[in-house]
Image (cartoon, rainbow, N blue to C red):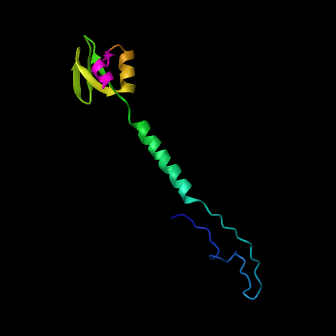
């Protein structure tokens, strides 16, 4: 069993003021914060984060002889798949896929 050093009773080392002595009071200042500005900043930050998290969707065509898998589904040469733009950039850079050109019908509409 470990040895325990004796300790003084709780509060024995603290100075106990005399209840009859006058006590000095320090001034206190309260600062008001405009809650609406903080809320609007938080709402703006959340909205910006949500918008940044939603990636642009891009259509790509898988090049032969490659096979890619997106969300558990395999795609082979000639298949068209819709993927986020950041993934499309990587796959296009690796020459596994090519971007599908936007049809003129979609440009007019």
> Is 107 covered by the magenta stretch?
yes
- Foreground pick, 10 / 84: 84
Query: Which quadrant of the figure has residue 50?
Result: top left
- 100 vs 89, left or right, is left
In the image, residue 87 above or below residue 62: below
- Tell me which residue sits at (66%, 67%) in the image: 30
- Foreground pick, 25 / 31: 31
Query: Which quadrant of the figure has residue 99?
Result: top left
In the image, residue 65 above or below residue 85: above
Residue 101 location in percent, x, y? 32, 17
- Tell me which residue sits at (44%, 36%) in the image: 52
Which residue range is magenta in the image? 96-109
Residue 5 seen: yes
In the image, residue 18 above or below residue 96: below
Residue 20 location in percent, x, y? 75, 89
Residue 45 location in percent, x, y? 49, 45
Quadrant containing the C terminus in the rendered view: top left
Query: Which quadrant of the figure has residue 72?
Result: top left
Question: Residue extending furthest bottom?
Answer: 20
Question: Residue extending furthest top?
Answer: 65
In the image, residue 8 above or below residue 48: below
- Foreground pick, 103 / 49: 103
> Is 86 covered by the magenta stretch?
no
- Tell me which residue sits at (54%, 57%) in the image: 36
Residue 103 seen: no
- 89 vs 18, left or right, is left
Mark count: 0
Residue 49 location in percent, x, y? 45, 41
């Amino acid at each position: 069993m470990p040895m325990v050093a004796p300790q003084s009773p709780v509060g024995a080392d603290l100075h106990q003021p005399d209840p009859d002595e006058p006590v000095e009071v320090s001034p206190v200042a309260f600062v008001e914060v405009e809650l609406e500005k903080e809320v609007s900043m938080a709402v703006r930050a959340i909205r910006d984060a949500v918008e940044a998290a939603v990636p642009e969707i891009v259509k790509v065509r898988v090049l032969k002889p490659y096979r890619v898998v997106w969300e558990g589904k395999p795609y082979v040469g000639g298949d068209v798949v819709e993927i986020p733009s950041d993934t499309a950039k990587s796959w296009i850079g690796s020459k596994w896929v090519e971007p599908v050109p936007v049809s003129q019908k979609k440009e007019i509409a």
